[in-house]
């Protein structure tokens, strides 16, 4: 649904966008979601093209009740990831004639995950309040290789290894207002605090020959001691309208100010080369719609499925040579009911683009496939008969 969720409070799935939503559930129920994501990207800059495929966990989260209208959730999901692989060959005949073939290769990989635990409670059957603690951890690798086919020349290998650690908190609110005739409007808001990054940044340069690997540079900087890197805070608001369990529509807006994060001043996090990388304000607009033809249909299975469509537009947290990097895309999904209760299999597709071919930027066009498993069961009940 385009990444919405701030104003979603369905009892049929776990919503990790807003911690306040976890309290809306069937009593005595245990819920779990597990998802996987596969992403295919095509990079283009002028006449240069390259592609890359990545595979990662989408999320793993569990939720269970605490007392009456309160509940908890605990889970893990990627916060950010890196995935690119670009390879070029030297084409200047004068250079090749002296050195032989030269291949330039740069690639990045790794993810930063967020481990979270949160809880929420509902008051007066309409107002839900939630909070969660978040721990960031992960590694990112950015590698640059210059390889010579002529073994009389030493190949060069350099790069950054980024070790990321951090801790922060997130708060959420939701208010549900009946509009009559089984129609409801939900207003939601979230706020995530900023946090100083811990961990380290290591820069290295190696000279490689057929016999030895010679380390030219190895420099490790401890985050929090040598710099003041931050993950910026974020505020989000949303509104949704829901007609029973037949359909729902939602719109979200999120804003995050990265200008004082230090991401554009600390090596390893910016862009290498002549381009100027500057941190900026990130904004995103998201909209989604869900429709279920007849959730209780006993004759036609496809009428019980939940069909979703969404769209998003995002302004990235950085600028390149003063140019804003934007992304936009469409999402499509369906949840297939499995067995009884709210168990289901969710399939999703995200088709989008980041950047453009203007002003010498790199354009990314991507297609992501997501598969999720929704598990529901009644665990917390007394045995009445033996």
Image (cartoon, rainbow, N blue to C red):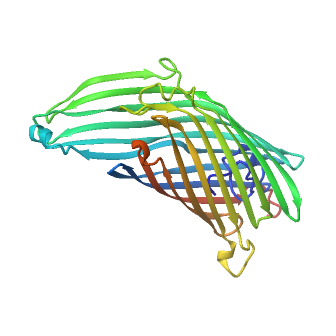
Question: Please, which residue is most extreme toward the front here?
Answer: 359
Residue 111 % position (x, y): 47, 41
Question: Please, which residue is most extreme toward the top here?
Answer: 225
Q: Is residue 378 visible?
A: no
Quadrant of the drawing holding the N terminus: bottom right
Quadrant of the drawing holding the C terminus: bottom right
Residue 297 in the image: above or below residue 142: below
Residue 48 % position (x, y): 32, 50
Q: Nearer the viewer, residue 22 or 380?
A: 22
Q: Residue, x 49% and y 53% (percent of image)?
A: 353
Q: Residue, x 26% and y 46% (percent of image)?
A: 88
Residue 93 % position (x, y): 13, 43
Q: Residue, x 35% and y 22% (percent of image)?
A: 219
Residue 265 in the image: above or below residue 13: above
Q: Nearer the viewer, residue 305 or 23?
A: 305
Residue 163 % position (x, y): 45, 31
Where on the picture, by quarter, is residue 207?
top left
Q: Nearer the viewer, residue 88 or 332?
A: 88
Q: Is residue 36 visible?
A: yes
């Amino acid at each position: 649904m385009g990444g919405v969720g701030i104003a979603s409070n369905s009892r049929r799935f776990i919503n990790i966008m807003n911690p306040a939503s976890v309290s809306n559930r069937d009593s005595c129920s245990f819920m779990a979601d597990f998802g996987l994501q596969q992403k295919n990207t095509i990079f283009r800059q002028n006449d240069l093209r390259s592609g890359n495929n990545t595979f990662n966990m989408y999320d793993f989260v569990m939720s269970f009740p605490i007392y009456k209208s309160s509940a908890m959730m605990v889970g893990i999901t990627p916060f950010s990831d890196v995935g690119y692989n670009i390879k070029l060959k030297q084409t200047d005949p004068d250079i090749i004639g002296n050195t032989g073939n030269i291949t330039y290769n740069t690639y990045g990989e790794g993810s930063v995950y967020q481990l979270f635990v949160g809880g929420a409670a509902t008051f007066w059957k309409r107002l839900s309040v939630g909070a969660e603690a978040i721990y960031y951890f992960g590694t990112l690798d950015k590698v640059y290789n210059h390889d010579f086919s002529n073994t009389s020349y030493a190949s060069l290998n350099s790069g950054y290894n980024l070790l990321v650690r951090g801790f922060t908190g997130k708060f959420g609110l939701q208010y549900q207002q009946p509009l009559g005739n089984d129609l409801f409007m939900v207003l939601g808001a979230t706020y995530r605090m900023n946090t100083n990054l811990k961990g380290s940044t290591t820069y290295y340069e190696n000279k490689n020959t057929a016999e030895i690997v010679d380390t030219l540079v190895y420099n490790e900087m401890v985050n929090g001691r040598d710099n003041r890197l931050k993950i910026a805070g974020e505020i989000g608001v949303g509104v949704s309208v829901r007609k029973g369990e037949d359909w729902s529509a939602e719109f979200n807006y999120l804003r995050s100010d990265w200008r004082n994060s230090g991401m554009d001043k600390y090596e390893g996090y910016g862009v290498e080369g002549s381009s100027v990388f500057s941190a900026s304000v990130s904004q995103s607009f998201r909209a989604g719609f869900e429709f279920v033809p007849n959730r209780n249909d006993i004759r036609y299975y496809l009428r019980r499925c939940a069909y979703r469509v969404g769209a998003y537009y995002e302004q990235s947290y950085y600028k390149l040579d003063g140019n804003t990097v934007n992304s936009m895309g469409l999402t499509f999904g369906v949840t297939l009911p499995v067995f009884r209760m709210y168990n289901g299999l969710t399939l999703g597709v995200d088709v989008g683009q980041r950047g453009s071919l203007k002003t010498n930027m790199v354009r990314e066009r991507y297609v992501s496939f997501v598969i999720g498993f929704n598990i529901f069961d009644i665990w917390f009940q007394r045995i009445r008969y033996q």
